Image: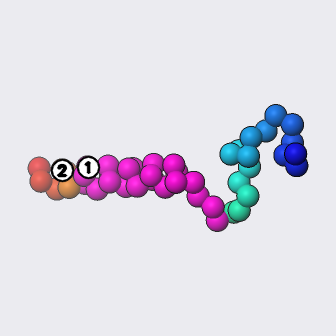
Amino acid sequence: MSNAAGSSKKNQPNDANHVSAETKAHQKRLTEQNKQEHQAEERK
């Protein structure tokens, strides 16, 4: 095993440009939320 003892591979980004699908989905959700909030404000 080349990984340090007790560390999971998940916690070691193997590539600076790598973004997990989880993070992408989370960012997309936040973006969608922001859009909806701005649209709601414009309607008032």
Percent of width and height locating residue 2: 88, 49
Residue found 25% across the figure and 52% down from its top: 36
Q: Which residues are magenta?
A: 17-38
Q: Is residue 39 above or below residue 9?
A: below
Asked whether, in this view, residue 40 is left or right of residue 30, the answer is left
Is residue 23 one of those drawn in magenta? yes
For mark 1, give the secondary structure.
Answer: helix
Residue found 57% across the figure and 54% down from its top: 20
Residue closest to the far front: 1
Q: Kindly identify which residue carries mark 1.
A: 37
Asked whether, in this view, residue 39 is left or right of residue 31, the answer is left
Q: Mark 2, residues whose alpha carbon is within 10 Å: few (<14), some, or many (≥20)?
A: few
Say if mark 1 contacts mark 2, CB within 8 Å. yes
At label 2, the amino acid type is Ala
Residue closest to the far top: 6
Residue closest to the far bottom: 17
Q: Kindly identify which residue carries mark 2.
A: 40
At label 1, the amino acid type is Glu
Q: Is residue 18 above or below residue 27?
A: below
Q: Which mark is residue 5?
A: none
Is residue 10 one of those drawn in magenta? no
Percent of width and height locating residue 42: 16, 56
Q: Mark 1, residues whose alpha carbon is within 10 Å: few (<14), some, or many (≥20)?
A: few
Q: Main secondary structure of the magenta part?
A: helix
Quadrant in the rendering for residue 14: bottom right
| Nearer to us in this view, 11 or 41 | 11
